[in-house]
């Protein structure tokens, strides 16, 4: 019965043209305004859960379904990251840092950065204090403009950077700091400019010379330059005030090891890319999820009412929420899980790459293939029965306990899983409880109900909408 089935070679997909591959079909389909993950889904339905595309010069495979996504995430041969031009242009054309690095250098950077983060309070009481302080600052800002319609899409950006930056750079900014707001806007623009396949600059890198404007090269380059200028300045300030006997933050710890170690690993460029990784991976994702969470709460009166009830019961109106309240706030936790599920901001994860030719299912994935994981579909497919409905109760048992559903993996799994999961979950809990303890959220009179249709990009984001924060009495 164990007949060996010879793997057919490359996974099936739409027929590629010579040289251009499927680029024209992709461009043709996307012109209707659908997001990339919707297009991949429609082809997955036609060709199967291992969809093989050729985009220009590059093989891209889209993998769907819980078991296959787990398989790709946990097999070492798929632990690579693509070295496409778009991914490399942010890191001096080299594989540096964590997010787009692989092999021994990735393992080392990931381990060292986590060690530094932990030594400055990552996932500890210290971090909780930073989160709590920032939430109180955010609540004060909303109290100062209570009752006015507020465009909420960027409202968490500086709060999130401040929390992370206390550990990384020992610094916090005023919530209305103009320079940092501009920088956050740049990151948002960068994340809107392409999808996780990396776009034309990956598939046909030479177009940057022919069509620098149209290919997006000019804009992306100027965004990266601005981000690197900011980080270089931050690192230089650390170099000038460094005291080797009392490191203040991750940057100091790195600089000290750079001075004391003979290891060639500790370069200025490495440090700059690590900071860029943390800033980009840590800001956009949490911000977009928090905004989607507000959107669903403001659009679902019943959800908002139940959140208010639970906050009033467990925390009351006076003391500040703490992370230890989570254990007794099953409904609030379920709202967080449901927000992570329905919004799935990392719609296609972060691309993996086959480090060698490898068999997956009945196919061969050639070395160097980009592999995108259909996380949005995993979280919004048939398993959930009514995936389009925002229904936190799906995560609560009849006995009132929280359900850990293995179909929900917003932070990925395996060796490459997100290093920010603990921080992201703490932030989302604290944002939600601090805000709803003090305010009732409403759509301003005259504004239409916000759309849950996301903006496409490296991560998904909500379309602009406004909320009024009415002080609860
Ligand atoms: C709601 C918020 C977040 C979501 C949904 C999210 C999701 C993800 C996903 C899906 C991956 C890729 C896993 C894989 O490759 O299979 C990832 C990787 C990563 N995330 Fe997050 N993330 C979030 C917040 C954060 C935060 C706050 C940080 C900063 C501390 C962070 C830092 C990273 C880094 C550095 C990686 C790369 C890990 C590696 O390649 O080894 N993320 N994240």
Image (cartoon, rainbow, N blue to C red):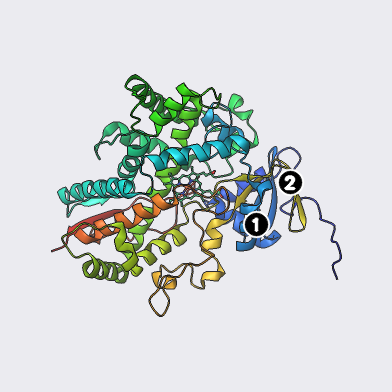
Q: Earlier in the sequence, mark 1 or mark 2?
A: 2
Q: Is residue 222 above or below residue 280?
A: above
Quarter occupied by residue 49: bottom right
Of residue 24 and residue 218, the one placed in the foreground of this image is: 218
Q: Is residue 79 above or below residue 268?
A: below
At 66% across and 48% down in the image, what residue appears? 76
Residue 176 seen from this side: yes
Q: Percent x, y for residue 69?
A: 61, 57
Q: Indicate the quadrant containing the N terminus: top left, top right, bottom left or bottom right.
A: bottom right
Marks 1/2 in contact by CB < 8 Å: the verdict is no
Looking at the image, the residue that sits furthest to the top is 240
Is the residue marked 1 within 8 Å of ligand 1, measured from its CB?
Answer: no
At 46% across and 29% down in the image, what residue appears? 272
Q: CA distance from mark 1 to mark 2?
A: 27 Å
Q: Percent x, y for residue 190?
A: 46, 38
Q: Percent x, y for residue 424?
A: 40, 51
Q: Classify residue 257 as left or right of residue 10.
A: left
Of residue 200 and residue 73, the one placed in the foreground of this image is: 73
- Marker disc for residue 16: 2
Q: Indicate the quadrant containing the C terminus: top left, top right, bottom left or bottom right.
A: bottom left
Quarter occupied by residue 377: bottom right
Q: Classify residue 211 as left or right of residue 312.
A: right
Q: Percent x, y for residue 401?
A: 40, 73
Residue 450 seen from this side: no
SS class of the residue under badge 2? loop
Of residue 361 and residue 38, the one placed in the foreground of this image is: 361
Classify 10 Å Cα crowding around label 1: few (below 14), some (14-19), many (20 and above): some
Of residue 113 and residue 119, the one placed in the foreground of this image is: 119
Residue named by callout 1: 71
At 69% across and 48% down in the image, what residue appears? 53
SS class of the residue under badge 1? helix
Quarter occupied by residue 40: bottom right
């Amino acid at each position: 019965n164990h007949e060996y089935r010879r793997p057919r070679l490359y996974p099936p997909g739409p027929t590629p043209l010579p040289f251009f591959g499927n680029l024209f079909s992709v461009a043709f389909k996307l012109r209707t305004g659908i997001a990339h993950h919707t297009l991949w889904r429609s082809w997955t339905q036609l060709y199967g859960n291992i969809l093989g595309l050729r985009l220009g010069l590059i093989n891209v495979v889209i993998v769907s379904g819980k078991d296959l996504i787990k398989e790709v995430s946990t097999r070492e041969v798929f632990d690579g990251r693509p070295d496409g031009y778009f991914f490399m242009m942010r890191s001096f054309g080299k594989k540096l840092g964590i997010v787009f690095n692989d092999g021994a250098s990735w393992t080392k950077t990931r381990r060292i950065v986590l060690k530094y983060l932990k030594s400055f309070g990552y996932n500890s009481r210290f971090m909780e204090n930073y989160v709590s302080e920032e939430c109180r600052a955010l609540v004060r800002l909303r109290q100062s403009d209570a009752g006015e319609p507020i465009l909420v899409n960027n409202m968490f950006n500086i709060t999130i950077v401040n929390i992370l930056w206390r550990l990384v750079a020992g610094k916090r900014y005023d919530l209305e700091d103009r320079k940092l707001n501009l920088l956050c806007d740049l990151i948002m623009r960068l994340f809107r400019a392409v999808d996780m396949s990396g776009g034309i600059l990956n598939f046909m890198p030479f177009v940057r010379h022919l069509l620098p404007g149209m290919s997006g090269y000019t804009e992306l380059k100027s965004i990266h330059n601005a981000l690197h200028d900011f980080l270089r300045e931050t690192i230089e300030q650390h170099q000038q005030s460094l005291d080797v006997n009392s490191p203040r933050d991750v940057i100091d710890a790195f600089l000290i090891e750079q001075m004391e170690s003979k290891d060639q690993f500790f370069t200025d460029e490495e440090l700059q890319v690590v900071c860029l990784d943390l800033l980009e991976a840590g800001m956009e994702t949490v911000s977009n999820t928090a905004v989607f969470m507000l959107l669903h709460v403001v659009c679902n009166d019943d959800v908002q009412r139940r959140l208010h009830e639970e906050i009033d019961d467990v925390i009351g109106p006076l003391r500040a929420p703490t992370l230890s309240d989570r254990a007794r706030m099953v409904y609030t936790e379920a709202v967080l899980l449901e927000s992570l599920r329905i919004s799935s901001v990392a719609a296609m994860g972060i691309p993996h790459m086959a480090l060698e030719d490898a068999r997956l299912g009945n196919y061969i994935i050639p070395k160097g293939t980009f592999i995108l994981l259909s996380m949005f579909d995993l979280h919004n497919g048939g398993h959930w029965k009514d995936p389009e409905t925002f229904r936190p109760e799906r995560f609560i048992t009849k006995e009132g306990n929280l359900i850990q559903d293995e179909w929900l993996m917003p932070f990925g799994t395996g060796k490459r899983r997100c290093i920010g999961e603990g921080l992201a979950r703490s932030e989302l809990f604290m944002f939600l409880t601090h805000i709803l303890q003090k305010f009732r959220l409403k759509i301003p009179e005259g504004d239409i109900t916000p759309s849950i249709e996301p903006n496409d990009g490296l991560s998904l984001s909500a379309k602009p909408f406004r909320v009024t924060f009415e002080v609860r009495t």
